[in-house]
Amino acid sequence: MIYQAGWFGTQEIVLIVVIVLLLFGGKKIPELARGIGKGIREFKKTTEDSEIADDLKDIVSEVNDIKKDVDKINPKKILQNVESKSTKKS
């Protein structure tokens, strides 16, 4: 059999379920699952509502604007323009 890292087999899953049942009992598991679900939902809602995504979009647009400005004053392009003008005059 070939085992891949990070994958559990049937025996491992059954063992984990038995241990969880012994530790928490059958009545506590649904409460734990509900609590975990609420926590995940709240985390997703908080990250979606945050202004971080908007701030990142603003930063990206500013960086793109700066990049365009730098390309306008790029010494290589200026030198190429000067050389092309001097060859045209010759």
Image: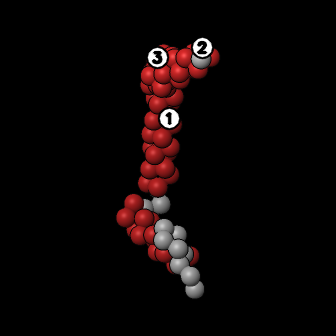
Residue depicted at 44% across the width and 50% down the height? 32
Quick check: 1 above or below 72? below
Spatial separation of the CA atoms under disc 1 and disc 2: 65 Å
Q: Earlier in the sequence, mark 1 or mark 2?
A: 1
Q: Nearer the viewer, mark 1 or mark 2?
A: 2
Identify which residue, 16 or 9, lies in the foreground.
9
Q: Which residue is mark 2?
A: 89
Q: Earlier in the sequence, mark 2 or mark 3?
A: 3
Task: Rate crowding at label 3 as few (under 14), some (14 to 19) or many (20 or more) other CA atoms within 10 Å.
Answer: few
Q: Earlier in the sequence, mark 1 or mark 3?
A: 1
Residue depicted at 45% across the width and 35% down the height? 43
Q: Secondary structure at mark 3?
A: loop
Which amino acid type corresponds to the residue marked 3 in the rendered image? Ile
Q: Are marks 1 and 3 in contact (CB under 8 Å)?
A: no
Identify which residue, 58 or 43, lies in the foreground.
58
Q: Which residue is mark 1?
A: 44
**View extreme (right): residue:** 88
Which amino acid type corresponds to the residue marked 1 in the rendered image? Lys
Label number found at residue 88: none
Could you tell me residue 23's position as x and y percent?
Answer: 37, 64
Residue depicted at 52% across the width and 69% down the height? 7
Label number found at residue 73: 3
Image side of residue 88 versus residue 16, left or right: right
**View extreme (left): residue:** 23
Q: Which of the image's four quarters has the N terminus?
A: bottom right
The answer to whether residue 43 shows anywhere in this view is: yes
Which amino acid type corresponds to the residue marked 2 in the rendered image? Lys
Q: Nearer the viewer, mark 1 or mark 3?
A: 3
